[in-house]
Image (cartoon, helix red, strand yellow):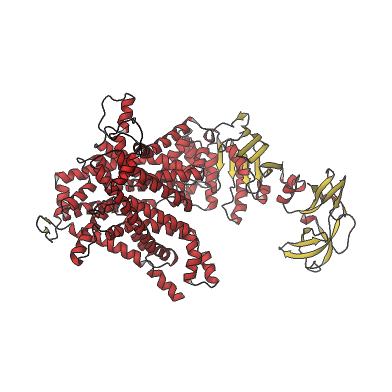
Amino acid sequence: MGALSLGRLAYLALVVAIFAFVIAPLLMIVWVSFFAEKILSFPPTGYTLSWYARASEMADFANGFLMSVKVGLCATLASLALGVPAALAIERFPFPGRETIRQTLLSPMYVPAIVAGAAVYIYFIELEILTNFQLAATFTGLVIAHTLVALPWTLRLVCASLVSANTISEEAARSLGANALQTFFYVTLPIIRPGMIAAAMFSFIASFSDLEKSLFLVGPGKTTLPIAILNYLEWSLDPTIAAVATVQIFIIGAALIVSDRFVKLGKVF
Amino acid sequence: MAGVTLSNIRKTYGTLAAVDDVSIEILDGELLALLGPSGCGKTTTLRMIAGFVAPTAGTVRFGGRDVTRVPVHKRNVGMVFQGYALFPHLTVAKNVEFGLKVRGWDKAKIAARVTEMLHWVQMEALAERSPRALSGGQQQRVALARAMAHEPEVLLLDEPFSALDAKLRGQMRTEIRELQRQAGITSVFVTHDQEEAMAIADRIGVMNHGRLEQLGSAEDLYKRPVSRFVAGFIGKCNFIEGHVTGPGRFETANGQALQFSGEHSIGPAALCFRPEHGVLTPLATPGNSLPVTVKAVTYLGPVTEYDLVSEAGNRLLVSASSSGEGAPKEGDKLSVAWSIGDAFVVD
Amino acid sequence: MREGRNWGGSALVVPALFLVAAFLLAPLALILRYSFDKYDPVKLMLGIFSPGNYVQAVADPFYQNVLSTTAYIAALSTVIVMLLAFPVAYYISRVESQRLRGWLIILTMLPLLLGNAVRSAAWMIVMGTKGVANAVMLGVGLIEEPIKILYTPTAVVIALVSVLLPFAIITLQSVMDAIPTSLEEAGQSLGHSPLRTVFEVVLPLAMPGVVAAAAISFALAMNAYATPVLIGGPTMKMMGPAVYDQIAKANNWPFGSTLACILMVVTLVLTVLSTRFLSRKYF
């Protein structure tokens, strides 16, 4: 089947066209971020880097970016702290009902983001009325919501690496006299480390790019980058926003490529 | 029906030659086995005959027709796949029918042919079953019926018995051999099992590192192997290193003179004999013999195998009918002898 | 050590379970309850239990329109997505080079992981009146005046298709990966052209994946928020934005909860359906 027949060529062209359909808008936005003119016109009259400077000077974007990074890091750490033990429990200590537990822990992935966002928002307000403890429009509240976004990714990736690493090396360590804790730190942890790094990356990406769950929970001065982009887009579309989007594209693209070094993404999905 | 001619076919992947300059003429109605270890190029060769792999060089002909650039679906081949590749979403009958509709046969003719094929492989009763509900042997029969239904010019079988357990394997290969004879179809089958190849093939092509080492009947290959690889791959064989000193004369590495039958040029070589041709005797006998020590005795029922080591450090194997009294024991110092007619030399 | 092991087994899962139970399941239960309450301009909620909101959501012409628009847009997007995802997923699952395969999957996933804000911004730049699409069409003389693409249902469908494609491709590709290539070879050896083999062998065997991917796509499209808001504009009324408007802007928690619960149930049914179909895979 080495020969390139006409049919095969047409098929190849179709696949390329579909990929182009998905990717082209992203290339466009990167391109536009360098346009000299504020009012979009194609082709551009010239190129400039000044929109990046302008974007970084805008408080909404600068603060949103910082907030997204901080929330993303906290949510990632929290989802690892909760997800790795949970994955271990599910994959290494068979207990009754563990499939139900697994599905429950993965459920944040399946509950529609807008529904979950609305529900968590109402819940936070009711909690505040009840206990006087404010979560809505606070950093803590955002981190809790984003940990929910990140947890399924951590669980999936760590479970996958636990499944692919068979239990024989752990049993070997136990037979050589290591206790459960030593076995975990000397054998299991090194084996699942690539999975954990990928889990951290994906957790961060999932948190960093989340829009719907944060929508209800942000407050004045507590806005994430995607929300800042959304607010700006409702009023105007110009190279500044393209510059902001480009920054996000490169951060997430880099995180993807880094995680691919640790876990072949072709095998994750 | 037609024979298949492979002329100097090559397949290279980058710098690696998976199949290197192989020429075979497969006769009309013949069953040819391609035999070799994994990675020897036998499967690639089969896939080039089928049309799944395009040769880098050389031609494939069915009868007089050059099919080298003809895609699979226009070649009119029948293929039985490793693991059978029956369609799980179709019934047994629909599987057999699969190649007929596309050829524009009318309904009545298709129905008749499906019945005929299922009768041929004795599967009429299970026509409406899902292939997943069948045993391995039954699946294989369906796969054969499906491959033969559209009256292909060539039947190709890729490790057809590897998914069966040992007992069924023997039965199925006799069955397939009979069905192939009845149909009189030119067939090529690929296997890594020399016993299987010897049992059913008219001729065997032994492949190694992408090359065809030897092509011949089972007896040819066993009695007159042309290379060390063939000698070692077809049956068990003892190799004694040394060099040929003259016509029929051989000298071992430590200087002992031995004799062999057949021709070989002067130079480094190995003298070979089969384990069943060796005889253990208490004394050194004139002619071909070596003093040995018995290292291990393995009782295998009708025969017993003796692992031996010669003074020069050669490991040798001799098998003999199991006998009760006076059989050699571990540690015995004996001689192994073999007749000159049974000794041959390879590079 | 044995006791430690058993104790560890059940306990390690508790913190994660607590997070999900306390901050997802409990909130969902809460809005399920509120969806049966009634809004009051002064007291916000009356504390009653009645299916009135559900009746209103189905009977009120405005929300009928929202529901039917949402379902129509979601269905149309799903059909287009499946038509596009199938050839791509098949290509990825059959590509020989593992490297290329890895890159194709990253390329597939990248837009998904960028999030809706960035992706919507990109589509706005392409589809705006002064956007790339209009500039190109004007440039080659296809049109004489810029046409309105952004803020139309067509624009929403186009953008949604690009949102849903990665999910559909990944779901289909994982099912196709498991279909042995020998089945396609068998099809071809029996006289079927490669294209016909796809329809007669690959499509039926991938059908559970097709149904699952379609269900997931439809559910995601129903729940879309950013795409209808940004690409559809203020006149585009879909369920996602309606939930936000009711709860965050109108403060009508009961009715907003009702809309959210309708979305939740539709999604739940489709998710269960898709897992059911996936479990019927041949391989």
Q: Could you tell me residue A207's position as x and y percent?
A: 34, 53
**Number of marks:** 0
Which residue is nearer to you in this view: A141 or C83? Answer: A141
- Vertical arrangement, residue B4 with respect to residue B285, above or below: above
Q: Which residue is found at the position 17% from the left and 46% from the top?
A: C63
In-image side of B229 versus B336 (left or right): left
A82 to the left or right of A6: left
Q: Position of residue A81 (x, y in %)?
A: 38, 63
Give the answer, above or below, for where C154 lies relative to C249.
Answer: above
Residue C262 percent across, percent down from the top left: 22, 52
Quadrant that contains the N terminus of chain B = top right
In this view of the protein, can residue C210 be seen by the observer?
no
Residue C200 point in image, percent of width and height: 44, 40
Residue B170 visible here: yes
Q: In this view of the protein, which residue sits in the foreground, C34 or C233?
A: C233
The residue lying at 70 percent from left, 50 percent from top is B233
Give the answer, above or below, for where B195 lies relative to A93. above
**Vertical side of A39 occupied by A233: above or below:** below
Find residue C75 and report its image quarter.
top left
Identity of the residue furthest to the right in this view = B286
